[in-house]
């Protein structure tokens, strides 16, 4: 079993381990620990401790912390956290926090405590937050942990979670905890959460509106698309719209581009650039076909985004596209940007293209005199 442990389905491995005594499982852990260190050993440890952690998290953690390498120890502890029940997280978190300083580097300890506290917050978010803030891990900027813990807390007690988040995020550039709280709050009381975001100052609204739009989109895409249109702060609206375009583009890039093209002029350009930029990386031919059929009001933005994202793999095609931009200033800027990137990678080819192109003599002279980008 040790030889093939990474290929054994989780349920099958769990069933096998459930028939073994704690002492036998500890002996298996010792055998795994005796394997030559490396990726293969870490994979076996991960598979074993995931199954054992689901079966008996405390015993699994007691063995995991004694593994001989930092990598193996970290992977095993994380595996236990991943599969253990949330109810046992307070005990696991305390054990990890009390490990000797030499047992885990500070960044590994911080990450593991954050994972444990985040899972703990599924059943008692206030206690999980208090615990993590009391540890040295609480001093680190583990943004994803604070975001998830805030979301879990707001689903239970929005006002308490909001009071904590507003204090926790004070001075931070990005309000990760507050973003999480607003998302969890919206699941519990949508209108109250929306009103809170709309009541914020410009800077806070620019940070919170995209986060809320993302949560909305996951629950009700059409509602999210309608909601972002009515945001009065232009920067917040554009940021939230960009999030919607990106999320829609992952599942339906054409719909994302179509929707972006229907937005008011103030938001349309950035939304179209986002949609086409994303689409041109996943399916360049389909994106090119859409750009070819785009209306005059969106074509320049679409071409600029498409040429920018095509430049690295096909600079000649990118320059050909950029040369069709109707706005003279935007066209010259795009051609210049693509050329200076290309000339840095392949100066002879880039300069030859300029010399053979249909550009005017002044344009050629200008481009050839430019230094490579970067």
Image (cartoon, helix red, strand yellow):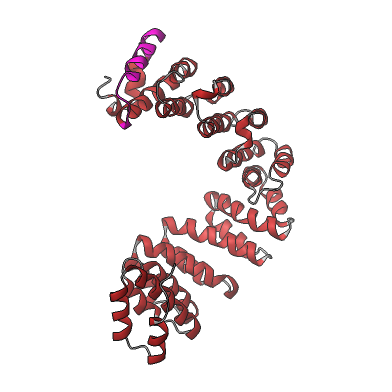
Estimate the x, y position of residue 175 in percent, counting from the top left.
65, 48
Choose top left, top right, bottom left or bottom right for residue 282: bottom left
The part of the chain drawn in magenta is: 18-39
Q: From the viewer's perspective, is 305 left or right of 350? A: right
Residue at 48% x, 58% y is 246
Given residues 72 and 284, the one toward you in this image is 72
Given residues 31 and 37, the one toward you in this image is 37
Q: Can you say whether 149 is above or below 201 in the image?
A: above
Residue at 70% x, 48% y is 171
Residue at 33% x, 19% y is 32
Q: From the viewer's perspective, is 102 left or right of 72? A: right
How many marks can you see? 0
Estimate the x, y position of residue 343 in percent, counting from the top left.
35, 73
Choose top left, top right, bottom left or bottom right for residue 50: top left
Residue projecting furthest to the bottom: 361
Given residues 7 and 329, the one toward you in this image is 329
Q: Quadrant of the N terminus?
A: top left
Q: Quadrant of the C terminus?
A: bottom left
* Magenta segment main secondary structure: helix
Estimate the x, y position of residue 347 in percent, counting from the top left.
32, 73
Q: Can you say whether 299 is above or below 233 in the image?
A: below
Estimate the x, y position of residue 249 in percent, counting from the top left.
44, 59
Residue at 45% x, 28% y is 74
Magenta span has 19?
yes
Magenta span has 81?
no
Choose top left, top right, bottom left or bottom right for residue 97: top right
């Amino acid at each position: 079993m040790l030889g093939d442990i990474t290929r054994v389905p989780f349920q099958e491995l769990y069933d096998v381990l459930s028939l073994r005594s704690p002492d036998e499982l500890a002996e298996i852990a010792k055998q795994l620990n005796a394997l030559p260190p490396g990726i293969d050993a870490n994979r076996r440890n991960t598979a074993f401790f995931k199954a054992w952690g689901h079966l008996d998290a405390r015993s699994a953690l007691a063995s995991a912390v004694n593994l001989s390498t930092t990598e193996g120890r970290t992977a095993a502890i994380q595996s236990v956290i991943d599969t253990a029940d949330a109810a046992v997280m307070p005990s696991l978190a305390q054990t990890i926090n009390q490990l000797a300083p030499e047992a885990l580097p500070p960044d590994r300890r911080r990450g593991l405590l954050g994972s444990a506290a985040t899972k703990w917050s599924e059943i008692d978010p206030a206690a999980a937050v208090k615990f993590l803030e009391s540890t040295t891990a609480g001093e680190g900027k583990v943004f994803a942990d604070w975001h998830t813990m805030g979301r879990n807390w707001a689903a239970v007690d929005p006002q308490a979670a909001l009071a904590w988040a507003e204090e926790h995020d004070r001075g931070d550039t990005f309000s990760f905890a507050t973003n999480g709280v607003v998302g969890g709050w919206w699941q519990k009381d949508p209108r109250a959460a929306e009103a809170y975001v709309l009541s914020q100052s410009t800077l806070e609204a620019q940070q919170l509106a995209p986060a809320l739009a993302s949560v909305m989109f996951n629950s009700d895409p059409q509602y999210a698309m309608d909601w972002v249109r009515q945001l009065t702060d232009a920067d917040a609206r554009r940021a939230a719209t960009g999030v919607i375009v990106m999320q829609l583009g992952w599942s339906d890039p054409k719909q994302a581009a179509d929707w972006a093209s229907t937005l008011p002029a103030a938001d349309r350009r950035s939304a179209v650039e986002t949609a086409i930029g994303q689409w041109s990386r996943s399916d360049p031919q389909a994106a090119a076909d859409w750009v070819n059929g785009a209306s005059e009001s969106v074509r320049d933005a679409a071409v600029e985004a498409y040429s920018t994202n095509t430049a690295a793999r096909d600079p000649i095609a990118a320059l050909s596209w950029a040369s069709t931009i109707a706005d003279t200033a935007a066209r010259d800027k795009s051609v210049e940007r693509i050329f200076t990137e290309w000339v840095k990678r392949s100066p002879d080819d880039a300069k030859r293209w300029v010399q053979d192109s249909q550009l005017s003599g002044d344009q050629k002279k200008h481009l050839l005199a430019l230094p490579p980008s970067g």
